Amino acid sequence: MDFIRKPMEIEHRSMEIIAPHLAGMGLTEEETKVYSRIIHAAGDVEYAPLIRMHPEAIVRAQEALKAGCNIYTDVEMVRTGINKRKLAAFGGEAFCCVADPEIRALAEQEGITRSMAAMRRFGKALDGSIVAIGNAPTALFEVLRLMREEAVRPAVIVGIPVGFVGAADSKRELAEQDMVPFVTVEGTKGGSPIAAAVVNAVMYLIDNSR
């Protein structure tokens, strides 16, 4: 059986297949590239009409990255999926503390999830950062609370938790707030690879070298 073997050729062909599903949506060139990365990471063109992106999300994320911002994630899978070599070239680091012993202790003390405790511990460090959430709706709810109650202001939130309990509600709340630009996906779809793909897509818009 003959098949494409070169990685960049596979990627190029994948984008050709995805392109017709984005035609007519009125996206900018930059938005099309981010949408395409989301669909490519999911292997699911049904994502196309479900993606919600604040009109300033891409430019704000690019500005933050160029300024050397850090990225804070809800789970290690998101942090692992981010191109940390490229992020380091901009001067930033990716952080996840959900597995730290003190986070476990805080979660038990407060009666909350570890992902909530992690975001609570990050606190004001989230200011000017990119927050990337791909697994835990509770982490997204906590970031939204920090924004409302403690005036925390990330540069951009990539909020794409997956699942049947709280995911759709947390993403709806994210899309309805007007404090911070965001990228999200309606409903139950999402996941760590999708959140990481958004972050990487924005970095590749700045510098597409691999």
Image (cartoon, rainbow, N blue to C red):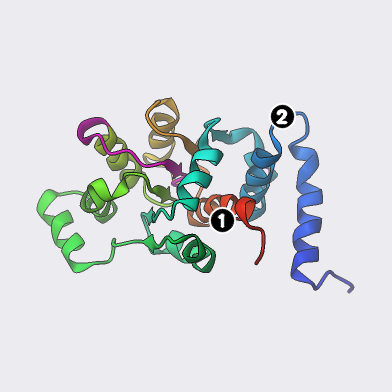
Residue shown at 53% from the left, 57% from the top: 193
Residue 185 appears anywhere in the view:
no
> Which numbered circle lies on residue 200?
1
Residue shown at 80% from the left, 73% from the top: 5
**Alpha carbon separation for disc pair 2 and 1:** 22 Å
Magenta residues, start to end = 148-162
**Above or below: residue 160 compared with residue 88:** above
**Above or below: residue 160 compared with residue 13:** above
Residue shown at 55% from the left, 40% from the top: 58
- Say whether residue 157 is magenta: yes
In the rendered structure, which amino acid carries the disc numbered 1? Answer: Asn
Could you tell me which quadrant the N terminus lies in? bottom right
Q: Earlier in the sequence, mark 2 or mark 1?
A: 2
Q: Nearer the viewer, mark 2 or mark 1?
A: 1
- Circle 2 packing at 10 Å, graded few (<14), some (14-19), many (20+), is few
> Which numbered circle lies on residue 115?
none
Task: Report which residue position mark 2 lands on.
Answer: 25
Locate residue 109, reporting x and y percent.
Answer: 10, 54
- Say whether residue 155 is magenta: yes
